[in-house]
Amino acid sequence: MRLALLQFIRSMTHDLEAHEALANQLDGTAAKAYDRGEIAKASVLRLLVRHYRIQAMNIRGNLEIASKTYKTKHQSDLY
């Protein structure tokens, strides 16, 4: 159980990093598209940015819950 929970936390951490990196990259691309006058393209890209940022917030919340669960169940192992 402990190892599975640690692997789950690690997996969520990687997912969080990927979502945040993708959102940042898309945000930069959207800004460049907007500067070039490609307003519709920039709009779609910003929708994707919001999607990935919301997903990142959800992952962050789940990561916090999993971390607290780990600390609660395995607190004696930490000291």
Image (cartoon, helix red, strand yellow):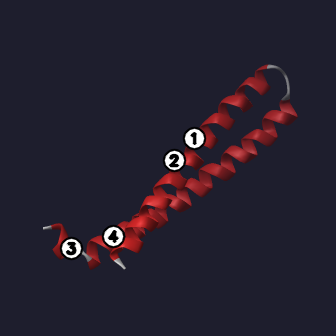
Name the residue beneath numbered marker 4: 68
Sort mark 1 into few (<14), some (14-19) or many (20+) by Cα contacts within 10 Å.
Answer: some
Rendered location of residue 73, percent (x, y): 28, 79
Q: Amino acid at mark 4?
A: Lys
Query: Above or below — where is 52 with respect to 30?
Result: below
Secondary structure under tag 4 reads: helix
Q: Amino acid at mark 3?
A: Gln
Q: Which residue is mark 3?
A: 75
Please report the residue visible at 21 percent of the width from the left and 73 percent of the height from the top.
Answer: 75
State how many labels appear.
4
Q: What residue is pinned by disc 2?
A: 17
Quarter of the image for the N terminus: give it.
bottom left
- Residue at 73% across, 24% down: 32
Kindly indicate whether the residue at mark 2 contacts the one at mark 3 (C-beta within 8 angstroms).
Answer: no
Report, in whole angstroms, how far the alpha carbon at label 4 lies from the one at label 2. 20 Å
Which residue ends up furthest to the top in the rendered image?
36
